[in-house]
Image: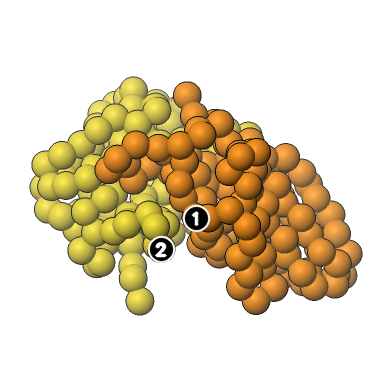
Amino acid sequence: DVKVTQSSRYLVKRTGEKVFLECVQDMDHENMFWYRQDPGLGLRLIYFSYDVKMKEKGDIPEGYSVSREKKERFSLILESASTNQTSMYLCASTLELRGYGYTFGSGTRLTVV
Amino acid sequence: QKEVEQNSGPLSVPEGAIASLNCTYSDRGSQSFFWYRQYSGKSPELIMSIYSNGDKEDGRFTAQLNKASQYVSLLIRDSQPSDSATYLCAVSLSGAGSYQLTFGKGTKLSVIP
């Protein structure tokens, strides 16, 4: 069964900290995505990557960066965490949209205090 | 900005009834359409995909697509309390090589026993 693993289910960090959210997939997918989900705002795309070393900004990249050094791992970095980055973060991957859609990780609930 | 619109609900239906969930999208070039189910505190899981105009059935679920009207819907027959969740409509971005999905904000479904 295909799997997308996010390293932490819950995280609490302090304002100003550098935060790393890790996502690993075991399906040999080229395409990986980071979303955040907030009540009333839905899923919003932060960054995505279609290949190793490649990254593209999504709709809300401000305050975030990403790293993709290996095909299976896509990391989201909060350079200096702020309270408005408190959210549910979801990683997803896909081989092809047609026939597959996205497979999501279980999510990381991040609270910045 | 490509948009996907859904009624936020809540949509309440009695057990055994048909639940009808609707979605409209703005990107006329979109080719792939998905319905995800999300239980509270969990990540989205894919339940239906549709790519051609018409109906597609899978068990109690039927997805309907009308590209001319830019409309996609999900019918759930014989609704069960376990179907109570938020349903997300997702639409692919048009353009060659795009693997991005745009999500609606979701419709919350409540099935009353």
Total numbered badges shown on the rendered structure:
2
The quarter of the picture where residue A81 lies is: top left
How many residues crowd mark 2 within 10 Å: few (<14), some (14–19), many (20+)? few
Q: Is residue B34 left or right of residue A14?
A: right
Which chain is assigned orange? B
Residue indicated by mark 1: B51
- Taking depth in this image into account, of A14 and A23 the one nearest to the observer is A23
Q: Chain A drawn in what color? A: yellow
Give left or right: position of B93 versus B64. Answer: left
**Are discs 2 and 1 less than 8 Å apart at CB?**
no
Mark 1 crowd level (few <14, some 14–19, many ≥20, 10 Å Cα): some
Residue at 85% x, 72% y: name it: B16
Tag in front: 2 or 1: 1
Give me the disc on residue A99. 2
**Amino acid tagged 1:** Tyr
Q: Position of residue A27 (x, y in %)?
A: 25, 66
| Quadrant hosting residue A64 | top left
- Residue type at numbered disc 2: Gly
In the image, residue A95 above or below residue B100 = below
| Residue A97, percent from left and from top | 37, 54
Residue A6 x/y as whole percent: 34, 57
Does residue B33 sit above or below B18 in this rendering?
Answer: above
For disc 1, the chain is B
Residue at 33% in and 62% down: A4
Q: Residue at x 39, y 62 (%)?
A: A100
